[in-house]
Amino acid sequence: MMYSYQHLFAFTKAIFKNIGCPEEEAELATEVLLSADLRGIDSHGVARLIGYVRLWESNRINATPRVQITHETPSTAVIDGDSGLGLVVAPKAMDVAIQKAQVAGTGWVSVKNSNHFGIAGYHAMKALPHDMIGIAMTNASPLVAPTNSLERLLGTNPIAVAIPAKEQPAFVADFATTTAANGKLEILQRKNQEAPIGWIQDAQGNNSTNPNELKAGGALIPLGGDTGSHKGYCLGAVVDIFSAVLSGANYGPWVPPFVSFLPLATNLVGDGIGHFFGAMRIDAFRSADEFKLHMDNWITTFRNSKAKSTGSPVLIPGDPERVTSEIRLQEGIPLLEPVVKDLQTLAERFSLRF
């Protein structure tokens, strides 16, 4: 089923307002959430709206947080999100990183006491209009087994880097540090399809194609699969440390789950979920115009490289999402039937129409 961006925006904003978000923050949260649907990352868009509402109903999300800096230097800051929506806390934190970069050349912000922040790419891309490189990452609930482990100790822990160019579209890398994000499994569950080999392991550590394996004690596999998972493990660990050990958030197995029906870990080691953001002013290194001109050259060189097959051209990170966004703004956003049912449930809950 197809729905216009405008229709989904109005409905989602109404939901956020109904859980108590002020007008401006409801609009911001909606923009961040729907950026995932526009860019084709359906696992992190309106499909997660009911999850945020359930976290609010469980008193794990504060709809009116007092987001504040608790420690800072000219180029760094730690922000306490006051249990707010990560969709609101994260862009505010990225704004602080950008402000510090404007003064000091670079800005670095670590966040604690937050919640799931949507897609990392949205936050990294906030730096682009300022002729800055943006970096965003977050830890997440433990669903990932480190290399050689049966225990789930890390999250999918995504990393995003956005780099501006002159005439070419920006370079935007946004990826989980697992072979596949948990949201991809959720989509397979809704479609009743199997997962590819290399995405998940069962409770005994064997490869599995069952997208419900996590419910039976299985785990996601770090990026790199059977022969290279140590690399994904390292990347996920770096995200966890930068996002949480650095800020005072929960890390490793103590990170709060996104689903409200799972209890919080006992003996928590920090506050909420953690994020990490960076902004780097290009002219702190070289002329922004020169840099962007060379980024154009870099992008066209890679894009024009000889492809292995005519049907699979060489892409630049961000190309598929940008094209999908253009199409979906015009033609609408497709939603699976289970997602539509969830939205209809929310409509009934708050006496709205969907």
Image (cartoon, grey):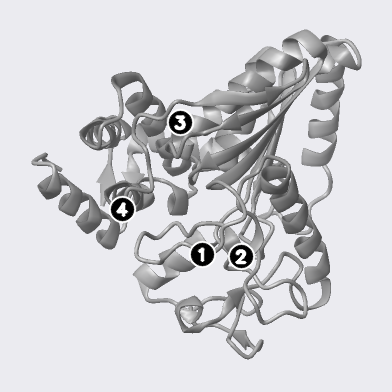
In the picture of the structure, the residue carrying the numbered disc 3 is 88
Q: CA distance from mark 4 to mark 3?
A: 19 Å
Task: Report the side of 132 relative to 217 (left or right).
Answer: right
Q: Tell me which residue sits at (63%, 69%) in the image.
A: 144
* Residue name at image x 40 percent, y 67 percent: 262
Q: Secondary structure at mark 4?
A: loop
- Asked whether disc 2 touches disc 1, contact meaning CB atoms under 8 Å apart, the reply is yes
Residue at mark 2 to residue at mark 1: CA–CA distance: 8 Å
Residue that carries the numbered disc 4 in the rendered image: 58
- Name the quarter where the C terminus is drawn: top left
Q: Mark 1 and mark 4 in contact? Answer it, CB < 8 Å.
A: no
Q: Which residue is mark 2?
A: 253
Secondary structure type for disc 3: helix
Q: Earlier in the sequence, mark 1 or mark 3?
A: 3
Q: Is residue 329 above or below residue 130?
A: below
Query: In this view of the protein, can residue 124 be seen by the observer?
Result: yes
The kind of residue on which mark 4 rests is Ser
